[in-house]
């Protein structure tokens, strides 16, 4: 991974402490990689690296989406359910010979955007706390997924649909390519566009942003829509990889995504954060899971270790 | 040192971030006396009281209680020494009962730590009766009126054996009837030998209650006199009297045609606000905090709704419903509280400068980073903003430099009308001067300026005309020639 994404702490504050913190996290990541490659012979191989990247791609797409919401001062707990709903919707339109591949893809992303729009409306117009809105939406979207699928997994999907999650393009698994494109577009949006800058401003000081003429409600709407739209995309990748539209899929995915964002140094209070940090958080969780797998450590312990890392990351964050 | 003297603060000084807020302030409190503490907003009253309350230590100076030198490590510590404060914004537990509030933190307990409700309620009742208060001790705090809550806070202080009570503008939020009850209570407390520090802007109350009046101004001790020897005129003089000669004097500007007309604006905070403003003119708006002066600015800038009335720009009626729309119409507002409304503190100097005018530094939806950097550098030079670099977080700058960042950002939209609300609060002398010069340069270019300020010398030196606001209405319009600090204060303070 190149250092490039860290040399602009995406806009906000470039005091030396932040660099130490960011590079500290990077150093911790590299140290863990080094440790794992010493402990397990297979860790540092191209094949294993590819496995890690493919494994983290879904969480990565979700984490990048929720980074936008968190930077602009909100939170989204409905992601896991949106993954399931979008996956089911995509699967329903992905039976062999039914429709062109674009139909399930576009529909699933549209479902995500619509849910994000509803979240955004409730937060901006209804002035309900984002935590509550998206907690409610978590249940609603899960219920919708069960309703449209009649509670049963949707199977018998076309080859071309299954290729999204399972196929390769020029030797690279397609989920990794999607993840990479999402990273690139997200960085562009956050660092190079007005709306990205406004997200930082709204999350940093909503009142000041409003007084400066920023359309605060609009900015928040966009953040929620990007977040849920990407959850729709993640839902497609997941359904395609497991060849099933599974209404019970994606439970608690939002927590993994938020964990990655937090580990990556984004402040839950809003206004501070980077895509690079989130990617690092995603990778950190990924390599640790993978390394512990390779060392045959039970997934029960993996959960404990992940929890410790989240708290440790925030502790470092607090030590200002 | 007299028999009754219970507290003596000598030469208390305090600076925040290098800006002196209190400079050798002294205070003598006597048992059984009400001591009024007066001064304009920002004179240092709150800081001084916070030091007496143990909220933070003074940089220098000493506090003596009953002849012994004391220092407080916390508000709790000060309370142990018998000093209690009734805050302007009451700190109560709304879901707990009156008795529970009175005994918060020192509940009488039975064995095993059970709360002895019987004793608690009985003692609370006795305390309430002592002050002839007719509130059930088991009522929930949230069901009380603000005046009653204040009484409970006072009783809580007495239950803590406080010998000194500090009251910060206790009558600002209560009814006339409750005010009378409060004053009776204060007289009772006085007879019981308590010392009361009374902070208020209301002259009639001061003259009715106080035995002694101490005046602070710009963090300095000005005078401490018995009420009998201090006439109201002289008191106002002491409160406001600053040397005008050291201040900036605006060159005479040519007023052009009318730019802004405000007609009969009414809102929750305002009643029938009407005035006009010509190009090339600085209109001062004076009034105490909470008088509605900031609400006028917010209404014009689309930050607060108004229920009736009309705003005209260049003779045309405009409907401004958001700051974005106001900016588009050529209005800029430097808000009163820059940390809350003016700046994104963790964002960089550059980002704060360019935020209001970001569209100008973009190509389509993409930011033009080079142009943005150039603009930021230019503005930093132009306003002489002292910062390590344009990427420095703005929260780390001094107050004056933060304010210059805010002004620079608003100026980049090139507004025709600029409203500055308390632009020099917490700003050092040098930056103040620069802000004055900036305002003068605006009117020289034919722009219109509204200056809202608590600092009367500033208003007097810069304004072509002055509006005095009290209780949401314009009480007076004064010309530059007739205006004086005394006259403004009379309109702003006295019924």
Image (cartoon, coloured by chain):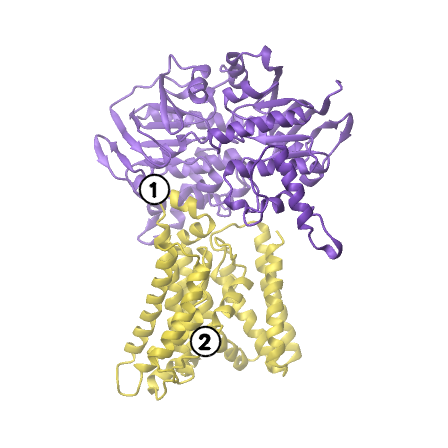
Chain colours: A yellow, B purple
Left or right: A178, with B139 as reference point:
left
Which numbered tag is attached to residue A250? Answer: 2
User: x%, y% of residue A29?
Assistant: 59, 67
Residue B69 sits above or below residue B486 on the image: below
User: Disc 2 on helix, strand or loop?
Assistant: loop
Q: Looking at the image, which is closer to me, A129 or B4?
A: B4
Q: Residue at x 43, y 33 (%)?
A: B382
Per the model, the C-alpha gap separating discs 2 and 1 is: 42 Å
User: x%, y% of residue A76?
Assistant: 44, 64
Q: Quadrant of the N terminus of chain B?
A: top right
Q: Residue at x 47, y 50 (%)?
A: A204
The residue furthest right is B68
Label 1 environment density (alpha carbons within 10 Å; few <14, some 14–19, many ≥20): many
Q: Looking at the image, which is closer to me, B30 or B221?
A: B30
Left or right: B240, with B251 as reference point:
right
Residue A129 sits above or below residue A248 on the image: above
Q: Residue at x 41, y 56 (%)?
A: A128
Where residue B449 sits, quadrant-wise, is: top left
């Amino acid at each position: 991974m190149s250092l490039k994404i860290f040399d602009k702490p995406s806009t906000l504050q470039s005091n030396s402490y932040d660099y130490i913190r960011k590079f500290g996290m990077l150093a911790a990541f590299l140290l863990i990689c080094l440790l794992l490659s010493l402990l397990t012979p297979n860790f540092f191989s191209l094949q294993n690296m590819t496995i890690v990247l493919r494994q983290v791609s879904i969480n990565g797409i979700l984490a990048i989406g929720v980074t936008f919401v968190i930077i602009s001062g909100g939170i989204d707990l409905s992601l896991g359910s949106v993954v399931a709903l979008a996956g089911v919707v995509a699967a329903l339109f992905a039976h062999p010979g039914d429709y062109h591949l674009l139909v399930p893809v576009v529909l699933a992303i549209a479902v995500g955007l619509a849910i994000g729009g509803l979240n955004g409306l409730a937060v901006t117009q209804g002035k309900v706390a984002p935590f509550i809105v998206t907690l409610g939406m978590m249940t609603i979207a899960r219920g919708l997924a069960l309703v449209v699928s009649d509670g049963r997994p949707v199977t018998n999907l076309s080859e071309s649909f299954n290729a999204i999650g399972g196929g390769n393009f020029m030797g690279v698994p397609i989920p990794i390519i999607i993840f990479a494109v999402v990273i690139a577009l997200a960085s562009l949006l956050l660092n190079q566009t007005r709306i990205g800058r406004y997200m930082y401003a709204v999350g940093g000081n909503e009142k000041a942003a409003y007084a400066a003429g920023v359309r605060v409600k609009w900015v928040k709407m966009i953040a929620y829509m990007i977040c849920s739209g990407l959850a729709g995309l993640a839902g497609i990748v997941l359904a395609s990889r497991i060849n099933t539209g599974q209404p019970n899929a994606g439970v608690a995915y939002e927590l993994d995504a938020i964990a990655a964002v937090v580990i990556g140094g984004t402040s839950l209070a809003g206004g501070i954060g980077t895509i690079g940090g989130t990617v690092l958080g995603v990778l950190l969780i990924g390599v640790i899971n993978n390394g512990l797998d390779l060392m045959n450590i039970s997934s029960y312990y993996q959960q404990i270790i992940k929890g410790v890392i989240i708290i440790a990351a925030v502790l470092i964050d607090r030590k200002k | 040192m007299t028999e009754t003297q219970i507290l003596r603060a000598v030469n208390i000084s305090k600076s925040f971030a290098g800006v002196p807020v209190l400079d050798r302030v002294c205070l003598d409190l006597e048992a059984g006396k009400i001591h009024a503490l007066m001064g304009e907003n920002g004179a240092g009253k709150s800081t001084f009281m916070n030091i007496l309350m143990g909220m933070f230590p003074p940089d220098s100076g000493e506090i003596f209680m009953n002849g012994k030198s004391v220092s407080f490590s916390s508000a709790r510590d000060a309370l142990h020494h018998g000093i209690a404060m009734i805050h302007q914004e009451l700190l109560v537990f709304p879901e707990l009962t009156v008795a529970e509030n009175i005994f918060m933190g020192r509940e009488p307990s039975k064995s095993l730590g059970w709360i002895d409700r019987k004793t608690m309620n009985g003692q609370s009742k006795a305390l309430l009766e002592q002050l002839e208060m007719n509130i059930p001790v088991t009522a929930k705090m949230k069901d009380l009126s603000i005046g009653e809550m204040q009484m409970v806070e006072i009783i809580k202080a007495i239950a803590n054996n406080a010998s000194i009570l500090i009251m910060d503008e206790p009558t600002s939020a209560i009814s006339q009837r409750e005010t009378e009850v409060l004053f009776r209570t204060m007289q009772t407390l006085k007879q019981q030998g308590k010392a009361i520090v009374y902070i208020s802007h209301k002259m009639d109350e001061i003259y009715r209650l106080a035995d002694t009046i101490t005046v602070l101004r710009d963090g300095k001790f000005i005078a401490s006199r018995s009420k009998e020897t201090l006439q109201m005129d002289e008191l106002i003089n002491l409160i406001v009297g600053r040397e005008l000669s050291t201040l900036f004097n605006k060159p005479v500007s040519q007023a052009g045609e009318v730019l802004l007309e405000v007609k009969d604006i009414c809102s929750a905070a305002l009643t029938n606000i009407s005035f006009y403003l010509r190009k090339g003119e600085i209109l001062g708006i004076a009034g105490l905090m909470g008088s509605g002066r900031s609400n006028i600015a917010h209404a014009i800038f689309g930050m607060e709704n108004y229920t009736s009335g009309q705003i005209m720009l260049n003779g045309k009626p405009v409907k401004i419903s958001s700051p974005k729309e106001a900016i588009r119409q050529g209005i800029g507002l430097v808000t009163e509280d820059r940390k809350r409304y003016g700046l994104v503190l963790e964002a960089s100097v550059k980002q704060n400068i360019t935020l209001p005018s970001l569209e100008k530094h973009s190509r389509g939806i993409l930011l033009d980073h080079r142009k943005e950097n150039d603009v930021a550098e230019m503005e930093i030079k132009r306003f002489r903003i002292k910062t390590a670099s344009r990427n420095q977080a703005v929260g780390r700058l001094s107050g004056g430099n933060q304010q210059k960042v805010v002004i620079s950002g608003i100026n980049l939209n090139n507004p025709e009308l600029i409203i500055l609300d308390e632009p020099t609060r917490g700003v050092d002398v040098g930056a103040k001067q620069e802000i004055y010069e900036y305002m003068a340069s605006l009117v020289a270019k034919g722009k219109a300026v509204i200056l809202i300020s608590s600092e009367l010398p500033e208003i007097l030196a810069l304004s072509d005309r002055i509006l005095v606001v009290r209780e949401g209405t314009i009480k007076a319009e004064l010309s530059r020639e007739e205006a004086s600090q005394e006259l403004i204060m009379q309109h702003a303070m006295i019924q």
